[in-house]
Image (cartoon, rainbow, N blue to C red):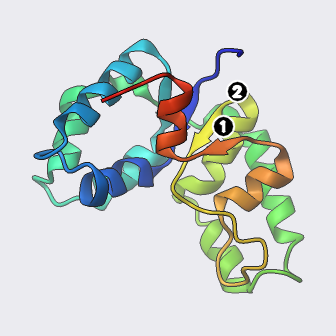
Amino acid sequence: MKYERYLLDTNFFIQAHRSYYPLDVVESFWIRTKELARNGDIISIDKVKKEIYDKSSHEDELKLWCIDNLEDQFFHPTDEALPQYIQIVQWVNSMRNQYHDSAIEEFLQTDLADPWLVAYAIKLNLVIVTYEKSSPGAKKRVKIPEVCNHFGVRFVDTIEMMRELNSKF
C-alpha cells in the first residue's frame, strides 16, 4: 500500500471530543492523534483551526488541547490551493439545479473549511478524514463527500483512517 497522508476536517476534533472520545475519558485517542501529527501522517488547514478556535469558549478543553499538543505547522495555510478552490466554486455554482441557493451560499462562505479542505486535498493528493456521509440527493446542504466524489478525492472516517495507519489506541 502506498503511503498516504490524511487531512482532518473540523468534525474529526469536535465530534471526537464531544461525542466519541472525550479528552477526559479516552486519553489514548488524543495521545495517538498527537503522535500521528508529530509523524506527519495527519495534518489540517488554517480554516479548520479557525473553526475550532472560534466555536470554542475561551477555556474550551479542545482548543487548549490543540494549543498544547499540535505544532504551529500542523494547520497549513490554504493560500496555495486557491486555483483548486476556484475550480470547486465553479463546480458548486454549476450545481444550482441540484442544491438550493442557500446551500451553495453556505458552502462557499469565505471562512468555511469544507471547500478549502477539498481544494487542499486536490493540491497535495491527500485523503480527507470526515464524519460527513455521502448524500447525493441532498438539496439543503453541499457535503464534502459529494465534492470529493466529483473531484476524485478519497475520504474516510476516523476509524477507517486509524485502521489504514495500523493505529490502535
Secondary structure under the numbered disc 2 in the rendered image: helix
> Dot 2, crowdedness within 10 Å: few (<14), some or many (≥20)?
few
Total numbered badges shown on the rendered structure: 2
Mark 1: amino acid = Tyr
Q: Which residue is mark 1?
A: 120
Q: Residue drawn 59% across and 66% down? A: 109
Task: Tell me the tag on residue 7.
Answer: none
Q: Quadrant of the N terminus?
A: top right
Secondary structure under the numbered disc 1 in the rendered image: helix
Q: Which residue is mark 2?
A: 124
Of 153 and 80, the residue lying toward us: 153
Residue 76 in sight here: no
Residue 97 in sight here: yes
Instruction: Measure the alpha-carbon separation of dots 1 and 2.
Output: 6 Å
Q: Residue drawn 71% across and 15% down? A: 2
Q: Position of residue 32 (x, y in %)?
A: 31, 26
Q: Position of residue 42 (x, y in %)?
A: 48, 27
Mark 2: amino acid = Leu
Q: Quadrant of residue 107?
A: bottom right
Of 116 and 167, the residue lying toward us: 167
Of 87 and 99, the residue lying toward us: 99
Q: Quadrant of residue 15?
A: bottom left
47 left or right, relative to 92: left
59 left or right, relative to 35: left
Q: Residue drawn 17% across and 60% down? A: 57
Q: Quadrant of the C terminus?
A: top left
Contact (CB < 8 A) between labels 1 and 2?
yes
> Dot 1, crowdedness within 10 Å: few (<14), some or many (≥20)?
many
Q: Position of residue 134 (x, y in %)?
A: 69, 64
